[in-house]
Structure formats: structure tokens, C-alpha cells
Amino acid sequence: MIPAAFDYSRPQTLEEAVNLLAQHGEAAKLLAGGHSLIPALKLRLAQPKTVIDIGRIADLSYIREQDGRIVVGAMTTHHAIETSALLEEKCPLLPEVARHIGDVQVRNRGTLAGSIVHADPAADWPAAILALDAEMETVGPDGPRVIAAKKFFVDLFQTALRSDEILREIRFPVTAKSVAYVKTVQRASGFAIAGVAVVVDAPRMTVSVGITGVAAKAYRATAVETKLAGQSLSAENMAAAAAKAANRVEPLGDIHASSEYRAHLAQLNTRRALVLAASRA
């Protein structure tokens, strides 16, 4: 199909983009990598009056260590994350997850923030965002605002980002190598039927688990975390904890997997991710 007519703006600075968004309000859509918006435009699922292309704002693409945390700019591509030596050393879950995203073309063009803001329930990044307790910094007419990961993903394709805000950067903690991402993939699209990100903090005897693809939004598997708190990562303990991966969750059911099968995959992949992360501790 052919998209409905729209005006096109290409700001060169973040300030200009924020002003344009404030000017056009909910009638505008931001264009980052385009992998979500362009298909929606073609199918007329999205019909904005104005498209604001932030792809040329150079100072939104970076990866650096700052104040003891890892900071990634909103327009940083999946490929840049996948190949970052700094992330491989200081936050290895990010390049591991990036390698699971789409194909080479998608990773070269798609952006971290574009995926996060779209909040597709089967996207890979939300699982890592939650497991790492990341922080999202946004910018709007009222200035910057920081949103914790646990409050960012609200519902199916919905986030806590306001219509007049732009996601500027995402902040992550420095972690050890004891992380893992295990995913059952939908072969045609590359999206997750069930993806599990695990971060093991061996000194503190704590585990963080983020799960995507199973429910209407990505979620922290708090029942798994509670079960393992202060416990050794024995095969028996990890299996018992993984059995709680879909507790208090309503798994989605569709042509790719029934709700029962998704719940099973959540448990299976949680156990696999726990075992893999523990082997790296």
C-alpha cells in the first residue's frame, strides 16, 4: 500500500526536534531507524500529519562510560552495540542481545531507542533493559526526565514516554561477564516467541531476569529472582526457580505459539539462561 500524505521535517539538533514535536503534538511521529514506522505507514496503521526524522542528529549516537555507568545514545544502532569493545568488557549483555536482532541489514539501520520506544512485546531489547535496571533519560519542553526501566514499559506498544518527549539516552550499570540471553525465535520475522535475559551478581547472590515475547509487555520475572535470592546456583535451585518464570503473567496466544507453549518456553529459556549465566560467573 501507499502511505497517506504527510509533511516531512529533518531537524539537525535535538533542541530543534523537541520544538517540532511540541509544535505538532500527537499529530507527529518520530522516525529513527524506520523499521517499525515505515511498515506502519505503508499499511496506514499510522497516519501522522508530520514525520520528524531524527536520524541525522549526530550527537544522539554514542557509547561511553560516564560516572561509573555505561551510557548509550538513543540513535546508536544495533550493529554499533554488537561490535562495541567497551560494551563487551563492561556491559556484555548488550552486545549479546544485539546479535539476536533481525539480520545484518536490520542491525545496521535499526536503533536502540527506536526499538525501546516502539515497545513491541516480542522485541529483544526490553528484556535486557529490565534485567539491567536501566534508566531512560528523555527530553521535552519541560526539560529532561529520567524513567526507571520497571516503569517504562506500560502495555502493548505503550511506554511511559510522553507524546512531546524524545528519548535521549539509556544508562546501564557496569556488570561482570555473568549474563546471558536465550531466545526462541519466530523464524520469519526474527522476533522473540520467548526471550530471557539474565544478569547474575555473584558477590551479592542476586539474579535479575527480564522476559520478552511472552506477555503483552516485557516483564521482570520477580518470582524467579525471589526464589534464587541468597541461594546457590545449583542445577536444582535454578530449575525450581525457572518453573516460576510465567507466574502472574497472561501469556499471549497466536498462530506462532499458544499461551501454554509460551509459558513453557518462558520456563525452559529461563533455566537455560540461568545455567549459561552461572557458567560465566
Image: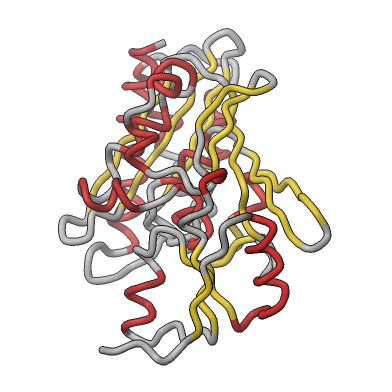
Name the residue: 32% across, 39% down: 79
Name the residue: 33% across, 13% down: 279
Q: Quadrant of the N terminus?
A: bottom left
Q: Vertical placement of 212 versus 6: above or below?
A: above
Q: Vertical placement of 277 versus 37: above or below?
A: above
Return the residue nearer the eye: 49 or 206: 49
Name the residue: 61% across, 35% down: 171
Q: Quadrant of the C terminus?
A: top left
Return the residue nearer the eye: 206 or 147: 147
- Quarter occupied by residue 258: bottom left
Q: Is residue 204 visible?
A: yes
Return the residue nearer the eye: 222 or 241: 222
Instruction: Left or right? Give the position of 265 relative to 237.
Output: left
The residue lying furthest to the left in this view is 187
Instruction: Left or right? Give the position of 103 relative to 31.
Output: left
- Quarter occupied by residue 148: top right
**Residue 236 x %, y %:** 37, 20
